[in-house]
Image: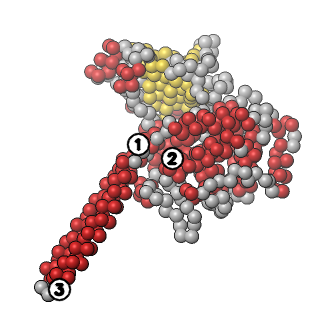
């Protein structure tokens, strides 16, 4: 879920004045500001305590600032002048709980002036959508080090912003990460989560995914999964959700994690949406590993379950199920063995089925994941996430079966509303390109075969000509038939291509 707060914007010459309200209000729908700009606040339901604890990013048309526990986003119809920013002064009114700042803009062009004159209203969706500029996280510039903030009107001193961000289950951990005698860079892309805002973690993940995506590897698995010899096709595997019997080690672990009442207490003012999104992120990775190994965990299972979970791999909190599913799709198409969209969709469907009626199965799988992590450097994930998630899902007070069923219902709705174009990897263009290449190769192969047949006819004597023509005719007819069948399969694939 997200809390939407109205950021007041006013353009004066080549300056954009922003007023960011920090006091939490009731969730509302998003709105567009006069002049074609929009603003929103996305993040936890917790109150902002330390305004100085902020991280600031600027794009051509976007301004993002993560303040303590919440992300504020602003989109402008005027282009910002990032090169002109040497120092950015932030003013905080601690009585009204409003942050004031001023951003330089480039001179308005003719199109922007026309938009300004129209004064696009927030309910004019058609006009607003026509000027909407997508946010590219990879093109944002971090300007936190250029910022100074004045914390009250009485104090004229400006101070630097600081980084003391929360992380872990329900964002309940603070400060330096605990030493587990492991090199964190081997298991995570975030070395010091308290020093990186959740916005920075999300940006880093997006950049890494775009860099690591392999077009050729995706092509290999597009038409059919590349299953190693001797292995069953994992796409045809059916998970046994009735397998809920715990081993002696699993029962002992569950008892040790839940035996004391104080262990079962949730953090004060925790955001259940954030906790649930983290749970889904972990479960999706578990479902992928189970399906890809046909429920025979191997030495790679710990790696698979961690790298497909950005909540673990980047210590990244989520506040929308849609973002969780998209992140899982992207990572499952980039890192593991099977990189096929439909295979990943099966994994999401497995997760939905598990949430609907199999809470005991979920507990067992979290315990198995805990054991997989415990024997390696990934034990750090047990301390900061798995221990608490096992307690959470077994706590019928905060996570009853009806709550899991609601999650399943919401996840199913999200799945129906996500398509390949939403992943930002250019999959539809890539698939169309591959299918055109296959059709071209088939036609070239057919043409070469016909040329070879003609050369063979010219080189043979008249005595064998009639017999050869008969064989050639049969061969060509057979080849044409085969070619037609192959073309029909490829063309059918193109017709069924999901956009």
As helix, strand or loop, the secondary structure at mark 2 comes to: helix
Q: Rate crowding at label 1 as few (under 14), some (14 to 19) or many (20 or more) other CA atoms within 10 Å.
A: few
What's the distance in space between the residues labelled 2 and 3, CA to CA?
60 Å
As helix, strand or loop, the secondary structure at mark 1 comes to: loop
Q: Which quarter of the figure has residue 373?
A: bottom right
Label 2 or label 1, whichever lies nearer to me, is: 1
Residue 263, x across and y down, in percent: 83, 39
Q: Is residue 59 left or right of residue 202?
A: left
Residue 189, x across and y down, in percent: 58, 48
Q: Which residue is mark 1?
A: 499
Image disc number at residue 330: 2
Residue 285, x across and y down, in percent: 61, 49
Q: Which quarter of the figure has residue 26?
A: top right
As helix, strand or loop, the secondary structure at mark 3 comes to: loop
Please name the colour scheme applied to the rendered image: secondary structure
| Picture quarter with the N terminus | top right
What's the distance in space between the residues labelled 3 and 1, CA to CA?
54 Å
Asked whether 409 or 389 is in front, the reply is 409
Against 373, is 145 above or below? above
What's the distance in space between the residues labelled 2 and 1, CA to CA?
16 Å
Q: Is residue 203 visible?
A: no
Against 382, is 91 above or below? above
| Residue at 29% over, 22% down | 111
Is the Cβ of the residue at disc 2 closer than 8 Å to that at disc 1?
Answer: no
Asked whether 350 or 66 is in front, the reply is 350
**Count of picture labels:** 3
Label 3 or label 1, whichever lies nearer to me, is: 3
Residue 392, x across and y down, in percent: 75, 39
Q: Rate crowding at label 3 as few (under 14), some (14 to 19) or many (20 or more) other CA atoms within 10 Å.
A: few
Q: Which residue is mark 3?
A: 464
């Amino acid at each position: 879920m997200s809390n939407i707060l109205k950021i007041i914007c006013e353009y004066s010459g080549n300056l954009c004045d922003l007023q960011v309200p920090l006091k939490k209000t009731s969730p509302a729908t998003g709105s567009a500001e006069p002049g074609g700009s929009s603003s929103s606040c996305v993040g936890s339901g917790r109150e902002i305590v330390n305004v100085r604890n902020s991280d600031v990013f600027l794009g051509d048309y976007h301004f993002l600032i993560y303040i303590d526990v919440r992300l504020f986003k602003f989109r402008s119809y005027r282009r910002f002048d990032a090169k002109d920013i040497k120092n950015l002064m932030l003013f905080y009114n601690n009585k009204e709980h409003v942050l004031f700042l001023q951003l330089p803009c480039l001179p308005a062009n003719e199109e922007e002036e026309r938009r300004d004159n129209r004064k696009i209203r927030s309910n004019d969706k058609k006009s607003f959508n026509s000027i909407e500029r997508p946010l590219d996280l990879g093109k944002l510039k971090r300007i936190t080090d250029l910022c100074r903030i004045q914390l009250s009107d009485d104090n004229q001193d400006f101070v630097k912003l600081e980084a003391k961000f929360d992380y872990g289950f329900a964002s309940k951990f603070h400060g330096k990460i605990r030493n587990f005698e492991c090199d964190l860079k081997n298991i995570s892309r975030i070395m010091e989560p308290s020093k990186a805002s959740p916005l920075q973690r999300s940006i880093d993940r997006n950049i890494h995914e775009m860099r690591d995506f392999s077009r050729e590897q995706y092509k290999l698995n597009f038409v059919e999964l590349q299953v190693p010899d001797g292995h069953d096709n994992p796409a045809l595997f059916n998970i046994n959700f009735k397998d809920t019997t715990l081993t002696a080690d699993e029962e002992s672990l569950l008892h040790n994690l839940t035996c004391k009442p104080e262990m079962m207490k949730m953090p004060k003012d925790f955001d259940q949406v954030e906790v649930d999104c983290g749970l889904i992120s972990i479960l999706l990775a578990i479902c992928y590993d189970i399906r890809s190994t046909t429920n025979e965990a191997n030495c790679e299972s710990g790696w698979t379950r961690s790298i497909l979970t950005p909540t673990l791999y980047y210590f990244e909190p989520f506040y929308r199920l849609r973002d969780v599913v998209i992140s899982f799709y992207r990572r499952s198409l980039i890192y593991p063995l099977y990189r096929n969209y439909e295979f990943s969709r099966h994994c999401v469907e497995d997760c939905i089925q598990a949430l609907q009626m199999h809470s005991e199965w979920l507990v067992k799988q979290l315990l198995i994941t805990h054991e997989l992590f415990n024997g390696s450097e990934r034990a750090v994930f047990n301390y900061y996430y798995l221990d608490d998630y096992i307690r959470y899902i077994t706590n019928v007070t905060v996570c009853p079966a009806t709550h899991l069923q609601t999650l399943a219902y919401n996840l199913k709705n999200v799945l129906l509303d996500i398509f390949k174009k939403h992943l930002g990897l250019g999959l539809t263009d890539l698939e169309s390109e591959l299918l055109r290449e296959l059709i071209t190769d088939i036609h070239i192969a057919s043409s070469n075969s016909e040329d070879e047949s003609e050369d063979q006819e010219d080189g043979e004597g008249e005595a064998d000509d009639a017999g050869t023509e008969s064989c050639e005719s049969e061969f060509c007819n057979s080849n044409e038939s085969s070619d037609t069948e192959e073309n029909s399969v490829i063309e059918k694939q193109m017709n069924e291509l999901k956009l």
